[in-house]
Amino acid sequence: MILYKNEGRLETPPKIIIEEFVVNRSTLERALGLSEPWKVVKDEFSAKERRLDITIDFERGSIFHCPDCGAVSKAYDSVMKTWRHLNFFQHETYLHARVPRVECSKGCGIKTIEVPWARQRSGFTLLFESLVMTLAREMPVAAIASLIGEHDTRIWRILHYYVEEARKEADHGAVKRVGMDETSSRKGHNYITLFYDLDQRQLLFGATGRKQGVVSEFADDLEAHGGDRNQIEQTCSDMWPAYINGVRDCFPNAAITFDRFHIMRILNAAVDQVRREESKNRKELKRTRYLWLKNPTRLTSKQKQTMDDLSTHNLKTAKAYQMRLTFQEFFTVPDRQSGEAFLQRWYTWVSHSQLEPIIEAAETIKKHWEGILNWLDSHISTGILEGFNSLIQAAKARARGYRTNRNLITMAYLIAGNLDYGLPT
Ligand SMILES: [Zn+2]
């Protein structure tokens, strides 16, 4: 809002005096985006109540349009409405207006007209809602609610509305490569599944749960947004059976690539299991857990020293670690043929190791052979999703959890959806 310092040169009569600032009504009208036939007719400022009330009205004899069909229609009556607007400094600001109802000349009936500063049935102006949408990406909804003095359910209603409206306009016609990942909504219990466009790097769809049905929900949603299930060429996920079966059912032309980071996580867990069992009799393994989870290049010089010392002890853990490190080289082989030979050699080596946890991991890998080899063709991973996932988890931590999955999914769209809300800024 443009302010004019009171220098005694503002002689245009209707003006609001706030402390040493003066704003005239035409400035207010411009700030509110008002145009014919709307005008500011009254403003009341209460320093004591820290409140500014602005009354807007339309000019007598104005012409209105039916909100449904656009036909020029006569005013029928009007209803008084109030909207919360952006604070004017620390002063809560409200707009008041009598909003005409028209009797549609084409027979739609009696309709409340749309006002330019707010959407139908909202108690907030568009600018106020725009502020809420901006804040919601940075701070918890509960904090916004207390900052602006509104109940958080009203804030959630704004967020849900804009996300749903923006999603209606979203075009998924070009989607060919999809990544999917789960994220927990409340500690350990509830899950949502998020589907991303790996090329545009944006969230396409969020579903409650992680059962097989979520993939077909996604396929339906994709087609509702101009996409085509037959056009999906690649998917990337972990080895969760519900996702694998869902993709096989819904995307007939998709090759599944298992995410390399999830595969490495399985091997890391196996190494850790070997270490835990062995450390019962080998005191030197105490407090070494994190060394075995790292790659040698990531070790500090002190950690490197410890590793070098341990390497002379003929430890099972060190052997398991070597198997994990060797597996990693799979992701550097040049083509599928050498990849297959590599996996075969690695599997033979590991399966003769007598290290149960690693053998188990190798069996899992063998069972998912094709999807692991597909990496050599597709080179896709859900790495970008991990980035979004950590933003979503951070928002969740700030909010100390979300009451509902719907709230979490809406927050995920805000963070990763790249949606166009069409709001004034
Ligand atoms: Zn009409």
Image (cartoon, rainbow, N blue to C red):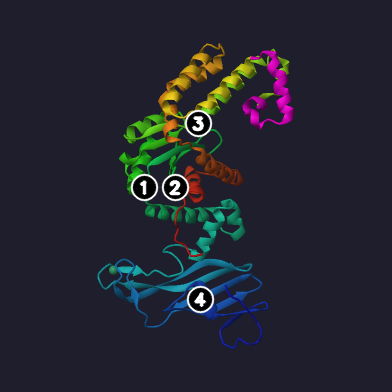
The circle on residue 260 is: 3
Counting other residues with Cα less than 10 Å from the Cα at mark 2, is it few (<14), some (14-19), or many (20 or more)? few
Which of disc 1 and disc 3 is earlier in sequence? 1
Amino acid type assigned to the residue bearing label 1 in the image: Ala
Number of dots carrying numbers: 4
Which of disc 3 and disc 4 is earlier in sequence? 4
Question: Spatial distance from mark 2 to mark 3, Cα to Cα?
Answer: 20 Å
Amino acid type assigned to the residue bearing label 2 in the image: Gln
Which of disc 3 and disc 2 is earlier in sequence? 2
> Label 4, on which residue?
30
Q: Is residue 110 above or below residue 263?
A: below
Q: Nearer the viewer, residue 119 or 133?
A: 133
Disc 2 element: loop
Asked if marks 2 and 4 touch (Cβ < 8 Å), the reply is no
Asked if marks 1 and 2 touch (Cβ < 8 Å), the reply is yes
Disc 1 element: loop
The circle on residue 200 is: 2
Question: Spatial distance from mark 4 to mark 3, Cα to Cα?
Answer: 55 Å
Q: Nearer the viewer, residue 47 or 7?
A: 7
Residue 302 colored magenta? yes
Residue 5 in view: yes
Which of disc 4 and disc 2 is earlier in sequence? 4
The circle on residue 174 is: 1
Asked if marks 2 and 3 touch (Cβ < 8 Å), the reply is no
Residue 82: % across, % down: 49, 68
Name which residue lies at 42% across and 79% down: 36
Amino acid type assigned to the residue bearing label 4 in the image: Arg
Question: Spatial distance from mark 1 to mark 4, Cα to Cα?
Answer: 40 Å
Which of disc 2 and disc 1 is earlier in sequence? 1
Q: Quadrant of ligand 1?
A: bottom left
Horizontal side of residue 309 vs 81, given as left or right: right
Asked if marks 3 and 1 touch (Cβ < 8 Å), the reply is no
